[in-house]
Image: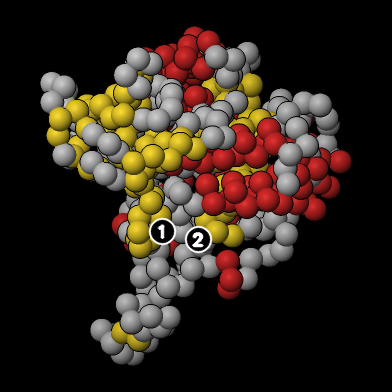
Amino acid sequence: MKKVELLAPAGDMEKLMTAINYGADAVFLAGEEYGLRTASKNFTNDQIKDACDYAHERGKKVYVTLNIIAHNQDFEKLDKYIELLDESGIDGVIVADPGIFMRIKNKAPRIELHISTQANITNAETVNFWYELGARRVVLARELSLEEIRFIRDNIPQDMEIEAFVHGAMCISYSGRCLLSNYFVNRDANKGDCAQSCRWKYRLVEETRPGLYYPIEENERGTFIFNSKDLCLIEYIDKLVEAGIDSFKIEGRVKTQFYVATVIRAYRLAIDAYYDGKYTDEYKKFLFEEIKKASYRDFTTGFAFHKPTNEDQNYESSAYIRGYDFLGIVIDYDENTKEATIEQRNKFVVGDSREAFGPYEKILYFDIEYIKDDQDEFVEMANKAKQIVKIKVPDRLLVGDMLRRKVENEEKN
């Protein structure tokens, strides 16, 4: 049985490496133009080549987004960019605009063409339309149930792959086709510059009473009438596979390295458990709790089982729930001294209780016995950005493992 692909976001090279090391089968990224995430660092032309080399050496794939809704001027530099992508060895491009699609097909026939969720694909006939044009994967709209996806799978060619979002932020607008950002602040969501207007606070103004604002109150600060909860389907891996999905897509190119590691690890464990016959109710609960150790906005199953109701919106706040702090990443381990060298991310002190995790199931729990700075001097805390320190750990840690700390009272930020 061919395993479903786990597809991870890569906002920069560090996150790409983390995603692959924590279990992703493929990553999707954007160059400095033509993608829809200007808030992430994205990749220079040279970095795209480096990303492909890193992924291919480990048997993984790289897909590049060119999914803007293009205007005439966007085609001026496109041929040169397509040539660069082809030479870099990318495995596929994610596009929404038919003009960009045809330009890539003609200029670089080697590159596999994937149709972006921005193309609003919600039925089998549209999938077959793109198949006839030469596409070999579609990213379905988020607004589909698993029953609808199953119907699509049964009515399209077997070699046409289905990719679907299984985790991450949801958009209030249909498949991300938002006009609010452009209207309010002249930032075009469909050109990659969304201001996330759906996360703002809103109040009601009556036309003949300018300046008089009426709260639509869920709390004293206003309401968040467009604010969806985050998608999370980790407890339904079996149903996703049975629906015929070929690639599970994780949203989050602007999220942190800690988020990428936490979420990709959990879905990797879930997928492997499913194929190994170990995807039990108890294991699902364990994975769901692990997912919640990265910041999130409560969770919803989106459209998977029913059309969203008011229960799938968060009317009180657009803040993230943060239950754990990311403390640092392991950059070395000494077998003789059992000391791990840590690159600090957030402050930690001697005596703290900590967790260490990596791209495997086991979690290491321990108290910090001592901290040494880069001069091998004992210190009471690691409190400088990216400070290099050593700590004693009770068991072996691997390079790339991460330290985290439970926040006593879960924060909203």
Q: Position of residue 25 (x, y in %)?
A: 60, 26
Question: Is 390 positioned to the left or the right of 207 in the image?
Answer: left
Q: State which quarter of the image contains the C terminus.
A: bottom left
Mark earlier in primary sequence (2, 1) = 2
| Res. 298 mark | 2
* Residue identified by numbered label 1: 321
Q: Residue at x 42, y 14 (%)?
A: 50
Q: Position of residue 405 (x, y in %)?
A: 36, 46
Q: CA distance from mark 2 to mark 1?
A: 7 Å
Q: Could you tell me if the residues under marks 2 and 1 are in contact, i.e. CB atoms within 8 Å?
A: yes
| Res. 217 mark | none
Q: How is the image coloured?
A: secondary structure
**Of the residues shown, which amino acid type is indicated by label 2?**
Asp
The tally of labels here is 2
On the question of residue 102 being in view, the answer is no
Q: State which quarter of the image contains the N terminus.
A: top right
Question: Is 105 positioned to the left or the right of 27 in the image?
Answer: right
The one nearer the camera, 11 or 6, is 6
Q: Quadrant of residue 33?
A: top left
Q: Position of residue 260 (x, y in %)?
A: 46, 37
Q: Position of residue 266 (x, y in %)?
A: 57, 40
Placement of 90 over or under 316, stated as above or below: above
Q: Residue at x 49, y 68 (%)?
A: 314
On the question of residue 112 being in view, the answer is yes
